[in-house]
Structure formats: C-alpha cells, structure tokens
Amino acid sequence: MPASARKLAVLPAAPVAPAPNSLPVSRPTMPRAEQVLPYLQAMDAAGWYSNFGPLLMQFEARLQARFSDGAQVVTAGNATLAIGLALKAMGLQPGARVAIPAWTFVATAHAVLWAGYRPWLIDVDPATSMLDPLATESALADAPGPVDAVIPVMAHGAPIDLDAWVLFQARTGVKVLIDAAAAFDVLDRGPLPAVVSLHATKALGVGEGGFFVSRDPVLNEAVRRMTGFGFMGDRVATIASTNAKLSEYAAAVGLAALDGWPGVRERYMRVAQRLRLALMGRPDAAFQPGWGLTWVSSVCVVDLPAGSAATLADTLAEAGVATRRWWGEGCHREPAFAEYERAAVPVTDALARSQLGVPFYSTMSDAEVDHLASSLSQALDRL
C-alpha cells in the first residue's frame, strides 16, 4: 500500500454532531443481565449449553402455553430459517411457486429462495397492508403457473383473519404458512402453521431466534428434525437438513424476557396510547387498526398523505427525529428478486410512498412522545 494511502487510512472520521432532541426510530427492549443470570446459573449447574437442553424445553413449553388450541412450538435459530424449514417440511414440489406479498420485509422472499422455491410477488389490500384471501384466490387465475403455497404476512404485527385463510386453503388446495414475524403479541392460535421472530428488535426478543407453531404433529416433527441435522432423538440423519437449533443461552434470555413480558407489553401500550392521543386531531397521520388499543408490536407505522413519506422523513430528520421505511420500496424493487415473477402491485407502490416508521419503543418518555407528535404535526403542516 502506498504511504499516502496508509496515511489516509488512519485519518479519523470527521465528528458528526447529533441533531437536537434526537429521537432514534427504535430501541430494543431486552432483559437486563441480572434478570438473565438465574437462568445462566441453572444452565451452568446442568452443564447443558445447546442441543435441546432443559432451558430450551422450558422456553418452548412457556411459549406453547400462550396458544389456546393446543398448537405446538418448535424454536429455531431465526425466523427466516424457520420459514424456509417450514416450507421444506410442507412437502412442496421441487422449484414450487410460492405467492408472497410484494409489501413485506425481504426475509420472506429470502426464505422462499433458500428453501429452493420461487417467489411470486403479488399485491396487498390497501386497508390492511396484507394479502386478502379472496383477492389472492382471484389472483391465482392469472398466476404464471401452478402455485403450491402462499405466505400471508401479518404486517408489522397486525392481526390477521386466520379462519379466512383456513377456508382459502380448503377451497384452493394451496398450502398456507403465516409469516407472523412481528406478531408475538397477537398470535395465540395455530390453525395454520406460522413463524414468529424473536429478534432483538421484536416485542419479545432473545437476540437472534424464532419459532414455528402449528397444530399438525407431523409437520412439527419434520420441522424439529430439520433444525438438528435430520436427527430425532438419535444419531441417524434421516433427511438432508441443517443446524438451526436455538441454544441454551438464547433460551435463558427468552425465559427472562417472558418473565418481564406483561410489564413490557403494558409499557408499549402506554406509549402507543399516548402517541395516539397526541395525534388524535391529525387524520392525515393514521395508525394501523387497533394498534395501541387491542394489540401492539415493537414498531409504529403511520399512514400519511399519498406520496409524502420521503418528504416527511427529510423534514423529521431536520427536527432530529429518525424514521425508517421498514420495507423500503417493496420486495419487487429489491435487486435480489428482480428476476422473479410478480403481478401488478399498485397498492404496494402506493404504500411504499405513504407509510413511514416513526420512533417507538417501550422506554419512550412522555417528553419524547410529545416531541415526536409535535414534529410530525409540524412536518405535515409544511406539506
């Protein structure tokens, strides 16, 4: 390396002064070290650190107890892996076409490709930002070929009509897997297989992790086998698989997170309700139906005047308020998926220009909520 290049390489970056009243778009809520410690001590006492140890079994049992219909839980290293493994376990044809919403996080499409299938990106309903079962059924007639499965996404953790999707599956024969990555708070039944994320940014997080849930014991066993080299209580690899287990360390964090979940949920709801009240007079800043009233997640997504998201993001940044377009321009705009089939997606395109993630976290102070509401109102007035 030339001397000049070496000299440039060690020059410190120019300091960037933080904006006044800076508000981050998110702050993860994770258990504190002292809350996790008793579980770590139990792990050390058992001498079991991975491979479906006692803490993981306890964690899965407590997650499973949240489901009112006897659905079973299988943990995995992350939700993207869990979606891919679930698709594999569902017995789709090699190279099968899987319908997914264009309006979703890229992990949904990545999981389909990782599992060896082809995503077909289709449009969502403007009222819910999610796939509609009747509209999806109609879209099948115009599909570029047979569709073996569909992955409805619970947008930013919002409730979904599970029973309507059960009927869709019965009518069409197309298998349904629910991407419930952000929906830990609301998903409490398992009539259809679903995957929940336990990433640190989610309402209940372990750092990296996820879980699969369903009432189908055969499917549950297949997913479990796939998380551990194809083993199932022995050392015989019965199927080609991978290593997607959740460790005892992650389970320790998860157990501590479950201990604190009622209080964390209450704080999320309090912050959400204060923000709703602060923006009550702004019909041009609409929240997802029921958000902060009957359900909550770790993010706040606001519907804004058509096409205004980018402008408002810039204006809010000037006020020190960070924002995030959580799903970018939509999966169909991502270079990684450019070659894959898609339907016309005008609703997705409109949502990408009109929805914006704004600061929201369980530890948000009243002053921070008020600053956000005031800054957003002023930014809207400037449109």
Image (cartoon, rainbow, N blue to C red):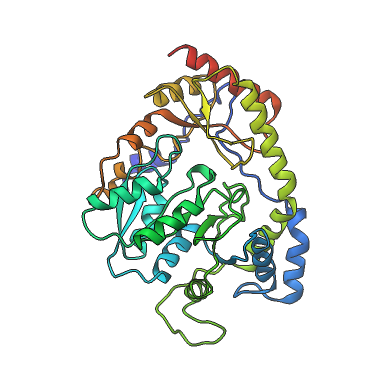
Outermost residue, top side? 382
Residue drawn 68% across and 75% down?
Answer: 48
Left or right: residue 141 compared with residue 289 = left
Question: Does any portion of residue 180 appear in the rendered image?
Answer: no
Residue drawn 65% across and 45% down?
Answer: 29
Left or right: residue 155 compared with residue 124 = right
Tell me residue 121's x, y (percent).
31, 48
Residue drawn 58% across and 17% down?
Answer: 281
- Residue 190: image quadrant is bottom right
Give above or below for 337 relative to 114: above
Residue drawn 37% across and 24% down?
Answer: 307
- Residue 311: image quadrant is top left
Left or right: residue 325 compared with residue 51 = left
Judge by depth and name the residue closer to the eye, 38 or 216: 216
Tell me residue 375's x, y (percent).
56, 18
The C terminus - image quarter: top left
Judge by depth and name the residue closer to the eye, 17 or 264: 264
Q: How many marks?
A: 0
Give above or below for 216 relative to 373: below
Tell me residue 25's x, y (percent).
55, 34
Tell me residue 54's x, y (percent).
69, 73
Question: Does any portion of residue 112 appear in the rendered image?
Answer: yes
